[in-house]
Image (tube, rainbow, N blue to C red):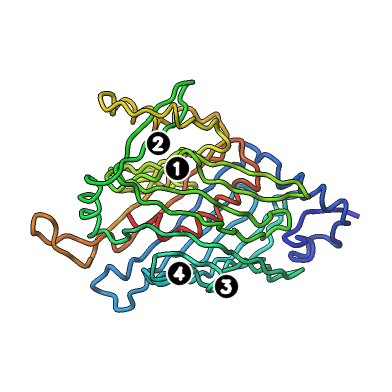
Amino acid sequence: MTIRFAPATFACAAGLCAASLLASGAALAQQSQALKEIPADKAKLTGAMTVDYNSRSMRSTSGTDLYEISDLSVADLMILKGSVQRTPGKSLVYSVKFDVINPSNPSQVAREVAILRGDLQIDANGRYIPDAGRLRIDVVKGNQTSSPFGGSIQGRNVTRWWEVAEQLRRAQKEADKIYSRMVDGKVVSIQVKNPDPLRFERTQLAAGPFSFLPDVRVSGNLDYDYELGNWLTDANGVTFAYTVADKSFTDRVSGSIRFVEENGNFTDKAGKKKPYTGYYEYNLRWNEQAVNTDQSFFDANAAQAQSDAFFSSADQSKPGLYGRVFYNDSEDACKRVKGDNGRDKCVGPTRSEVTWDLKAEKLTYAQLANWVKLEMLILGPLTDE
C-alpha cells in the first residue's frame, strides 16, 4: 500500500490513493510533515489580489468592498483563490477555496478540496468575532470535516483615512511606546507615538485543510504606527500555540511590516513587469531572541540611525518571512472630505492591485500556514492604509 498525506486524507479527496493512515502511523506522519522545514526553493508566498473599495467610490451604491484573491500560493502546500466581501465596520464574508498539493508528489493537485467560508462579524466596539458568523474551513471532498475560527480580535481604534490626522494630533499628547530588537548583537530601539493595536484575544485559527495542520491559538498585539504606516510587534510578539502529534509548540513572531510609499516597477512570478505605488516590506522573525525590557532605551539624538537599523532586512538568514507585498493604488471617482488645509481630498484608494512576493526562511509548513490563516483574518486592517 502506498501511503500519502491528506487534507483529511488527500487520497480520498483527490482520488490519488486508496486508504487512510493507521492511527500510529498518522501521528508520526503528521508530526513529520507539519514540522518539516520547507525546502528553500519552495519556500515562497506569492500571488495576487485586487481590491475594489466600493465604500469609497462615488460610482458605487453598494458600500461593500470586494477582495478577489487569485492563486495565492503557499509554498508547495496549497493555493488560495476566491473572494471576501467587506462591509466596513460590520462584517467580512468569506468564500476562499483551497487547492491542495500532494506533499509526496507535487505534480498532483486536488482542486477546490476545502473552503474558507462564513462571516467575520464586527461588533460596536470594533471587535472581530469569527464564531458569531460561523467562520470556518470546510473540507468538502473526501473525508469531509469542518473546523471553526474562534476567539476575537480587537480592531484598531481608527479605520477611516480621514480620521488619521485627528489620531496623530491626539498621539502628540498621549503615551509613546518603545520597540526594540537585536541587530548584530546590539539592542536597537525606535519610539512610536500612541500606536493603535490589533489585539489577538485567544484568537483561534481553524485546522486544515490538511489533517496535519492543527487548530492554533494566537495571542499578542500587532501595532499600527499612523505616522509612518508601519506594523510592529511589541516585546511579547505574536504567539502561535498548537499541538502536533500530542506535542505542544509555541512560536513567537516578532518584527515589522514597514510601509514604503514610492512609485516603481517589479517583476511578478510570471515574469511580467508591473507598476506599484508603494509596498509593505516584511521583516518578521520566528522565535528570535527576545529583548529584555530593561535593555530598551530610545536615544532621540540617534533616532534616524536607530530606525534604519531597526527596519533593516539585510540579514535574512534567521527563520522568518521576508520580502515585499506590492500595491498599485488608484483613486478614480473617490469620495472626498475636507483636509486640514480646507481642501477636498480622497478618503483613500478606490482600487488596489496587490501582489505578494515573500520568502519563508527556515520555516516549517505549519508555521507558514499559520501566518497565512492569520493574514486572511486581518485582510481588512492590513489593506486599509
Q: Is residue 301 above or below residue 168?
A: above
Which residue lies at the image location 61% right of the left edge and 35% below the top edge? 362
What mark, if any, has residue 92 been given in the picture?
4
Task: Name the image quarter holding residue 80.
Answer: bottom right
Earlier-in-chain disc, 1 versus 3 = 3
What mark, if any, has residue 148 been given in the picture?
none
Q: Is residue 220 above or below residue 49?
A: above
Earlier-in-chain disc, 4 versus 1 = 4
Earlier-in-chain disc, 4 versus 3 = 4
Q: In the rendering, at what x and y percent does residue 344 appear?
A: 12, 62
Q: Are marks 2 and 1 in contact (CB under 8 Å)?
A: yes
Q: Identify which amino acid the numbered label 1 is placed on.
A: Thr
Q: Is residue 280 above or below residue 216?
A: above
**Closer to the camera: disc 4 or disc 3?**
3
Residue bearing mark 3: 134
Extreme residue toward the bottom, this view: 61
Q: Identify which amino acid the numbered label 3 is placed on.
A: Arg
**Closer to the camera: disc 4 or disc 1?**
1
Residue 208 versus residue 159: which sits nearer the camera?
159
Mark-to-mark CA distance, 2 and 3 = 36 Å
What mark, if any, has residue 233 been given in the picture?
1
**Closer to the camera: disc 2 or disc 3?**
2
Mark-to-mark CA distance, 4 and 2 = 31 Å
Q: Identify which amino acid the numbered label 4 is placed on.
A: Leu
Q: Identify which amino acid the numbered label 2 is placed on.
A: Tyr
Mark-to-mark CA distance, 1 and 3 = 28 Å
State the SS at label 4.
Answer: strand
Task: Name the image quarter holding residue 350.
Answer: bottom left
Residue bearing mark 2: 179
Extreme residue toward the left, this view: 342
Mark-to-mark CA distance, 2 and 1 = 8 Å
